[in-house]
Amino acid sequence: MNGIQLLNKDQLISVLSQGRTATAIHIGEEAVIQVANQAMLDIWGKDSAVIGKGLEEALPELKGQPFAKMFKRVWQEGITLSGAETAADLMVGGQMRTFYFDFEYRAIKDELGQVICVLHLANDVTDRVMNRRIIQQVHAKDQALEREQALNEELSAANEELKAVNDELDQSQTELSLMNELLEARVAARVKDLSKSEMRYREISDELAAINEELNAANEELMSSNEELLEAKENLQKTFDQLEDKEIALRLTVEAANLGTWHIHSVTRAFITSARLRELFGFHPDHEITIDDALEQVTEEYRSYVQQKFENALSGNGDFDVSYPVVGFHDQKLRWLRAIGNLKSDKSGEFSSFTGVVMDITPIKKDEQRKNDFIAMVSHELKTPLTSLNGYIQILQRKVNGVGNEFINNSLVLAGKQVKKMTGMINGFLNVSRLESGKIVLSPTHFSLSNLVESALEESRMIEDGMNFIFHGCDHLLVYADYDKISSVIVNLLSNAIKYAPLSKQIDVKCELADQMAQVSVRDYGIGIQTQDMDKLFERYYRVQSDSHISGFGIGLYLSAEIIARHNGRIWVDSEPGQGSTFYFSLPLNGKV
Ligand code: ADP
């Protein structure tokens, strides 16, 4: 080598150390660091203490990275391995960071081809890589921005188009809804028209159907009425025939019984009479008479009574059955007549027909008169000895009072009671005969009904001390009546209540205002009365047929009824057999007698 001295090993290493390119020399499989210049140490972030250490020992953070393996291969296989911008994680300044290197691991061989070391060259390109990356990122960002812008533009263009389409749609929608409204209005109007005409049509139909039904019904009614009419006509004919038969029978009966007949029109008072009736009133048979003509013939004492009964019946208050004496118009004969009548309202309701018969009851009356006279005479005759008997009993009572024995005392009391009872009976008979011969005259006064009822009760309590008379009080009722006669009615009702309730110990007496009348009632809990007997009780001498042997003559209620009738009152009974009876009578309040 022509005078040029070759560099020794240390010089070579020094040269290498000063090279700017990071250089290191490794030997062996562990890549033990033989030489590492400052540039390499800077890259590693280490100092020269790493010289003589294996690669992974010197840089423990490389464990798990591929570099140690690469060295091993290069050492073993004598090859060169290189990398560009290869990432390596290194601990520099106490911090792990990723760096990028262009590097080469080159196996250096001796003349025999034996690997003596591995030359390690490295160039830190981290900045370059990072810059490029940033540029790339910026570029990518720009591109993305551009793309976004382009997209945005497309979007806004699309939006515009959409808006235009929307506007168009809106317009069409508005037009459509307008058309719709128009159409709906037209349809509604049409539907209204249609439903109106349909309704009308239905109404007419219904009306027609109803009319038809009515017509049918009327037709049917007409047909059935026709049938009924035919039937009625036949029945009428039959009834006419029957009536004719009956009329003949009636005429024959009337003639046979010698009855007079009459007919009165309630409004016109037309009085149609038969010849026999006129005869009974003492007129010539062909002499037409008026109601007043007939009434004129009734004896004076009976006239107003008959007239009242007649008016009463004519105004629809019950049947007419009156017996009265008349004096014949021509013959001046006294006849007793009994008139029985019945009022029938005309269907029009405007007038009534009052029809009846009159019969001559003079023989019966005469007979009765004779009987009455006889009873009156007997009663009268019996009264005188009874009065003396009563007197003697009273004298005896006074005489033995306190000194006689008990038996005699009791017998005298009983005898007195029996005489009183008998006197009562005889008085009853006398009263009947007086009544019938018109000798009973009323002497009315104003008095309080409650006073009368109470004193009558007092009297009854004295006679019947074993009976419980319950007086249920009395409204303040003033009447104008004959005190004694009304008193005799109450006494009679009370004595009947005692007599016909032998097993009961209670009698309820009440007086009250009912239907504008003063009403008295006497209730007993005795044997009661069958319905069929109720009306007849007030007839003269009527007694209910029964097994009981209760004494009496059937004149008490007859007399009571007559007295009440004379006062324009009413007497009646309500009863249930076995449960007891309630007798009522009513008087007009302060009424005229
Ligand atoms: P008398 O009692 O003297 O027979 P009345 O004229 O007083 O006559 O009575 C007529 C009839 O009415 C009586 O016979 C009797 O049958 C019936 N009667 C009257 N009062 C009552 C009564 N309170 N309970 C049941 N029946 C009675």
Image: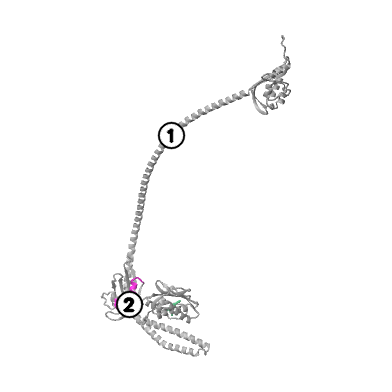
Could you tell whether 409 is left or right of 360 in the image? right
Q: Is residue 258 above or below residue 241?
A: below
Expressed as whole percent of the image width and height from the top left, the position of residue 285 reads 27, 76
Residue nearest the observer in this picture, 332 or 100: 100
Q: Residues within 10 Å of mark 2 (few under 14, many from 20)?
A: few
Expressed as whole percent of the image width and height from the top left, the position of residue 148 reads 52, 29
Q: Label 1 is placed on what type of residue?
A: Asp
**The quadrant where residue 28 appears:** top right
**The quadrant where residue 376 appears:** bottom left
Magenta stretch: helix, strand or loop mostly: helix
Residue nearest the observer in this picture, 102 or 50: 50
Which residue in the structure is indicated by mark 2?
Answer: 304
Local SS, label 1: helix
Q: Could one spot residue 276 in this view of the protein?
A: no
Q: Please give the range of residues in magenta.
A: 294-317
Residue nearest the observer in this picture, 403 or 104: 104
Quarter of the picture containing the N terminus is top right
Local SS, label 2: helix
* In this view, the mark in front (1 or 2): 1
Extreme residue toward the top, this view: 2
Expressed as whole percent of the image width and height from the top left, the position of residue 436 reads 36, 81
Expressed as whole percent of the image width and height from the top left, the position of residue 504 reads 50, 77
Residue 328 inside the magenta-drawn segment: no
Quarter of the picture containing the C terminus is bottom left
Number of numbered discs visible in the structure rendering = 2
Q: Label 2 is placed on what type of residue?
A: Ser
Quadrant assignment for ligand 1: bottom left
Q: Which mark is residue 569?
A: none
Identify the residue at image location x=45%, y=85%.
419
Which residue in the structure is indicated by mark 1?
Answer: 167
Residue nearest the observer in this picture, 465 or 446: 446
